[in-house]
Amino acid sequence: MDWLKIIHILCVMGWMTSIFAVPRALIYWKRDFAKTSENGPLGDLTYRLYRFSAGLMVLSLITGIWLGAAVWAFDTWVIVKLALVSVLVAHYMMTGGMVMRARRGTFNESDFYLRVFNEVSVLGVIAILWVVVVKPF
């Protein structure tokens, strides 16, 4: 099970990189698009980062659920963690919607909204880490 934990942690780290980076990259992509009216390399990079990390998210979920069942028998803290992770998945899907709209040249969100949206994910990750480390339930 140690290898499974290692794979889980690596995949989560990669997924978190995208969760924190893509909303911020959307700000710069939006600014670049306003100047050039083209997606350019920044848009391509943002899209590729999002798409690559989608696979990491799936692997994180699979390994996390496997660990939750096999190692911790779905203790209460595991269920709470999975509930918090589902909120993070919803956040990630919303980010994906913004990326897909941006590829079509539609940027509906303000810079301020994207900054706040980005920071909300940090609060979610802190909550997840607290549940995993403290195991309060």
Image (cartoon, rainbow, N blue to C red):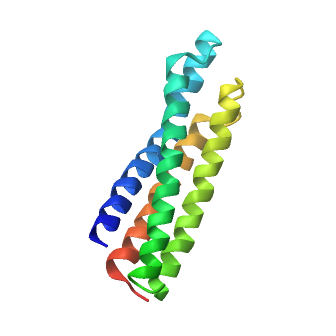
Q: Nearer the viewer, residue 94 or 112?
A: 94
Tally of numbered tags? 0
Which residue: 62% across, 35% down?
A: 99
Question: Measured from the top left, where is residue 131 in percent x and y?
Answer: 41, 77
* 23, above or below 11, in the image: above
- Which residue lies most toward the top here? 36
Question: Measured from the top left, where is residue 12 in percent x and y?
Answer: 40, 56
Which residue: 58% across, 51% down?
A: 92
**Residue 130 found in image quarter:** bottom left
Which residue: 66% across, 29% down?
A: 102
Question: Measured from the top left, where is residue 116 in percent x and y?
Answer: 54, 48
Q: Is residue 33 visible?
A: yes
Which residue: 63% across, 50% down?
A: 93
**Residue 108 found in image quarter:** top right
Question: Measured from the top left, where is residue 49 in percent x and y?
Answer: 48, 36
**Residue 113 found in image quarter:** top right
Q: Nearer the viewer, residue 90 or 35?
A: 90
Q: Nearer the viewer, residue 65 or 38?
A: 65
The answer to whether 132 appears left or right of 116 in the picture is left
Quadrant assignment for the N terminus: bottom left
* 126, above or below 17, in the image: below
Quadrant assignment for the C terminus: bottom left
- Which residue lies most toward the left here? 2
Q: Is residue 123 visible?
A: no
